[in-house]
Image: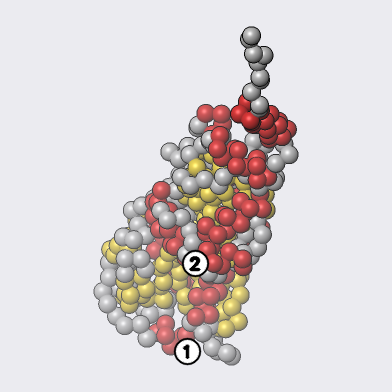
Amino acid sequence: MLLAALLALSPAHADAQALPDVGVTLDIPAGWEMTRWSNWDWKGKTADGSVAVDVWATPFQVPVTKEAAEAWAGLYTERLDDMRAVGILRDSVAIEEIAARPTARTTMHFAFDKGGPKGVMLVAAFAVEGQMIHVSTLAAGPNAGRAKAALDALLTRLTVDKPAADLSTLGGPATTTLGFTPTLPDGWRRPLPVEDAYVSDAAAAILIGPKDPAACLHAVRPRPSGEADVLLFCGETWKLGIVDEDSFADAEKALKARFFGKAADKIPDGTQLARAERLGILLAPEINGKDLRIGALPYDRGTVVVWGIGEPGTGTELESAVRGTAASLSFDGPDGGASVHDMGEWLVHMLTYEPFHPAIVGSGVLFCGILAGFGWLVFRKPRQTDAVV
């Protein structure tokens, strides 16, 4: 069935054909035929019809390594599986330099149908700005040499209009205008502009995320699969209140109620997010098919909220990232960005959680003393003086 599909491609003339959404222009050799052409992919065949060609992109720019190439082989297996190929095996993976671009070369073997002829899929993957380009050729086994020649021709003739970005400056400390600076963990970085739409989609998918994700600092940990874990660092004006060991349970309940409303009771109990100078809260729900970690820390402008969003099974790694970045935060405000509370807030907090604190007891004794003195002055009997004869 797959062999028939490869040989039944409809003809169309092609030459220089741009894929503007991915930043590549293909220079198609004379006589090759195109069957699909969009802003982001291209399909066709060689002039003699012996080799099918497929060009597409996956989100996120990642370093071209052998580990990444092994992950991409899983994507190629899925692609062949969709074509109803069987007996799919990865044969080899190699990293080469082609036109000054690090390129992963992968060879896949398969059968066109159960018991049918053998086939080969040759794929080259390289980075452009914010994406990975995959250029593949497919052919029956005897035409493997032609498939390789076709792939080599494509790779040497194409033009990259949006070269891969320098990712080296996107990790580490991430300065914001929100009054704090986090240091991103290893493997995390700020997204490129073309990647940022994925972050917005991830924030929208959890339904309860920040009201204005664009106002938050974004960070991603891309995967070769085209997915990524996401961190959003948001500065909120609302306050957690005075959070300490005594008030933690009530503050945790109030935070869950803020985010989850009537569903708060279904959310697992939060845990402490501790720093030397302040105490925060970490929540660990699963929302809408996503693992989620929410860290909240008080600071002078209100509350820092860190949202960690990932696919199922990433919760442990997300929690490590949220805890690590919360611990790394440096603050712009006075006194290390300490949260500000007036005397009334402190008094209510101490009367609620520390009624026997020496300051409260002393104030109570002093107040009672003043009240007693005032009462004595008001209610004492007046002194009677001796009459003068």
**Spatial CA span between label 1 and label 2:** 21 Å
- Is tag 1's residue or tag 2's residue first in the polypeptide sequence? 1
- Which amino acid, by three-letter code, is at mark 1? Met
Percent position of residue 73, x then y: 56, 68
The answer to whether one can see residue 74 in this image is: yes
Q: Quadrant of residue 71?
A: bottom right
Nearest to the observer: residue 225 or residue 343: 343
Colour scheme of the picture: secondary structure
Say whether residue 164 is left or right of residue 320: left
As displayed, is residue 206 above or below residue 182? below
- Which amino acid, by three-letter code, is at mark 2? Val
Looking at the rendered structure, which numbered label has been put on residue 99? none
As displayed, is residue 3 above or below residue 137? below
Quadrant, the C terminus? top right
Q: Residue at x 37, y 73 (%)?
A: 43
- Residue under numbered circle 2: 123
Whether the residues at callouts 1 and 2 have beta carbons within 8 Å, the answer is no
Query: Dot 2: within a 10 Å radius of its alpha carbon, few (fewer than 14), some, or many (20 or more) residues?
Result: many
Q: Residue at x 35, y 66 (%)?
A: 40
Give the structural element (helix, strand or loop) at label 2.
strand
Percent position of residue 291, x then y: 59, 63
Percent position of residue 72, x then y: 54, 65
As displayed, is residue 329 above or below residue 49? above
Query: Dot 1: within a 10 Å radius of its alpha carbon, few (fewer than 14), some, or many (20 or more) residues?
Result: few
Looking at the rendered structure, which numbered label has been put on residue 1? 1
The answer to whether one can see residue 128 in this image is: no
Percent position of residue 276, x then y: 67, 36
Nearest to the observer: residue 118 or residue 228: 228
Give the structural element (helix, strand or loop) at label 1.
loop
As displayed, is residue 347 above or below residue 294? above
Q: Residue at x 53, y 49 (%)?
A: 305
